[in-house]
Amino acid sequence: MRFKQYLNEGSIKNILSGIGKMSSGKMKTVFKKSFDKMIKIIIDNNIESDFLNIINKNLKTNYKSLKQLQALKESNLNEDFKNFLTFWKGETFPALSIFPTLQIWFEIDKLFSGVNIVDLDWKKMAVYGLLWILILTGQHIRLFKKWKKENPQDWENEGKPGIFKKGKKEDI
């Protein structure tokens, strides 16, 4: 096959380093064009059934033609992963924010067991307290940015004017 000359470590490294330097939009365009070229090569060499057998075996799918494969949209392919990320983001924040709080309460609980206030692990409490504040602040900033993006009119009315954004507020 004439493509065998491109299958060496040096050429693959060059391709991967070039991909790593691309923006995501350009990368999608390059991948789409490359996929279309690959489909054309597969059709020209009459190896469609071999290719589909490999795809179906490895992806555990049942594609009958390359047209079915070409018809897939990126959103369909990424939907499950996006749902997983949404679920993970929703569940991670409560899990991460409760742990530092519990560690602080475990130290405070020692007071009920008769330990003197001097014997508490203040370094541990400070580290977990700082971690808790960082997690909550990060969550607040993320939700504020989401609100700002979803409600630009409210942001203009409530959040934009003021001495920190545009200088002195004009009298109406």
Image (cartoon, grey):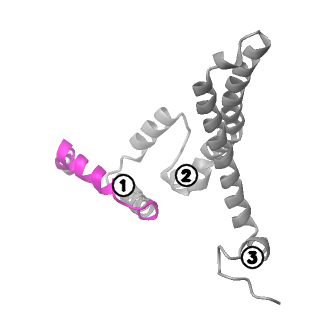
Residue 18 falls inside the magenta stretch: yes
Which residue occupies the foreground of this view, 38 or 65?
38
User: Along the polypeptide, which appears first: circle 3 or circle 1?
Assistant: 1
Q: Using the image, determine if residue 76 lies above or below residue 125.
A: below
Which residue occupies the foreground of this view, 68 or 105?
105
Q: Using the image, determine if residue 165 lies above or below residue 137.
A: below
Q: Which residues are magenta?
A: 3-26
Q: Using the image, determine if residue 133 lies above or below residue 72.
A: above
Quadrant (top left/top right/bottom left/bottom right) for the C terminus? bottom right
Residue drawn at x 46%, y 39% as measured from the top left: 55
Residue 172 visible to the viewer: yes
Instruction: Check disc 3 and give the amino acid type.
Output: Glu
Residue 12 percent coordinates (x, y): 24, 47
Identify the element where label 1 is drawn.
helix
Q: Image quarter for residue 118? A: top right
Q: Which mark is residue 68?
A: 2
152 lies left or right of 55:
right
Instruction: Count residues near mark 3 (Cα–Cα under 10 Å), then give few for <14, some for 14-19, many for 20+.
Output: few
Residue carrying label 1: 38
Residue farthest to the bottom, as pictured: 172
Residue 19 falls inside the magenta stretch: yes
Q: Which mark is residue 156?
A: 3
Identify the element where label 3 is drawn.
helix
Q: Image quarter for residue 60? A: top right
Residue 72 visible to the viewer: no
Instruction: Check disc 2 and give the amino acid type.
Output: Gln
31 lies left or right of 158:
left
What is the CA distance from the residue labelled 3 to the residue labelled 1? 49 Å
